[in-house]
Amino acid sequence: MIRRTLAADALVGLLLFATGCSLGWFASRHFMGQPLFYQGEFGPAVMLAAGRGFVNPVVRPGTALARFLTLQQPTLNAEDVAQVEAGPIDQLQKQTTYLMRLVGYEWKLTGISWRNVAGVSALMFGLTLAVSYGVARVLAQALGEIRDAIFAPVGQRAIRNLALEVFGHLHGLSLRYHLERQTGGLSRVIERGTQGMEFLIRFTTFNILPTVLEIGMVGAILFIALTAPLPSRNGISVSVRTNPISCLRDSKQAMASKPLVAVRTR
């Protein structure tokens, strides 16, 4: 089971990575236009693409390198930086070495141009989606465990108090009642009651109350931001949607409880 879950998560991660790469490539080529990401600091990427190594060039005003880094021209030739002096790497370039090197290697393959960063954009989009999915899965599991750890003492205490109250009430009944009733059936009824109470507390705490709070907050925002008829229509639509579901659920529960009633009457 665990292997299947991991395989499914890996498959979803790969699909999200591929989707993100496709979206990043398409967006950078067709919609983003001129990208803006501190181009003035990408001197080491230019030098790496030109075969000079990962060094920071000394940018002098009026040169082709200066015009390229200030977005005055979109492309640059490797010969334009052949005689450029090398200087030390600054702090920002040290912190973003991975990005500088990725852009530099891509420029070495496709040419030094701000348009030729689609591969890096695609990789960043894909990694962002895949990593976000992984983080969301881990947080979902962790928050579920934290929720159970917080709720377990409260729920178990309520169930224990209910079971003790029912057990004490049964012991306070007359002997004739116990002789006429089936003790095993009563035990099953008590067990089902405690399980139903646990489900009711959990469902109310983590499903019904958050949903009611969310609907109330959304209705208040719509009432403040928009006119009053819109929240009213939303409330009516929610009521129309929930009433048939509640009736259907009640009918199913009534049908499921008929055998239990028959056992009790026997």
Image (cartoon, grey):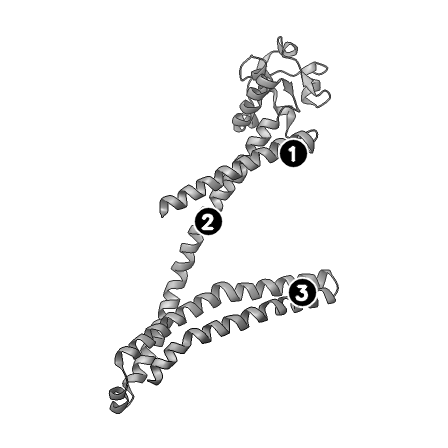
Marks 2 and 1 sit apart, C-alpha to C-alpha, by 29 Å
Number of other residues with Cα within 10 Å of mark 3, as a class: few under 14, some 14 to 19, many 20 or more: some
Contact between marks 3 and 2 (CB within 8 A): the answer is no
User: On screen, 92 above or below 233?
Assistant: above
Marks 3 and 2 sit apart, C-alpha to C-alpha, by 32 Å
Percent position of residue 105, x then y: 55, 20
Amino acid type at mark 2 = Leu
Amino acid type at mark 1 = Ala
User: On screen, 111 above or below 23?
Assistant: above
Given this view, does label 2 or label 1 mark the residue nearer the observer? 1
Q: Residue at x 53, y 29 (%)?
A: 95
Tell me the number on the disc at residue 63.
none
Secondary structure under tag 3 reads: helix
Q: Quadrant of residue 73?
A: top right
Q: Nearer the viewer, residue 237 or 112?
A: 237
Numbered disc total? 3
Secondary structure under tag 1 reads: helix
Percent position of residue 39, x then y: 64, 26
**Residue on which the image places disc 1:** 27
Percent position of residue 18, x then y: 54, 35
Please give left or right for residue 50 compared with residue 30 in the image: left
Marks 1 and 3 sit apart, C-alpha to C-alpha, by 36 Å
Tell me the number on the disc at residue 139.
2
Q: First in sequence: mark 2 or mark 1?
A: 1
Please give left or right for residue 180 compared with residue 116 in the image: left
Q: First in sequence: mark 3 or mark 2?
A: 2
Q: Quadrant of residue 64?
A: top right
**Residue on which the image places disc 3:** 234
Percent position of residue 231, x then y: 69, 65
Amino acid type at mark 3 = Asn
Q: Nearer the viewer, residue 20 or 222?
A: 20
Given this view, does label 3 or label 2 mark the residue nearer the observer? 3
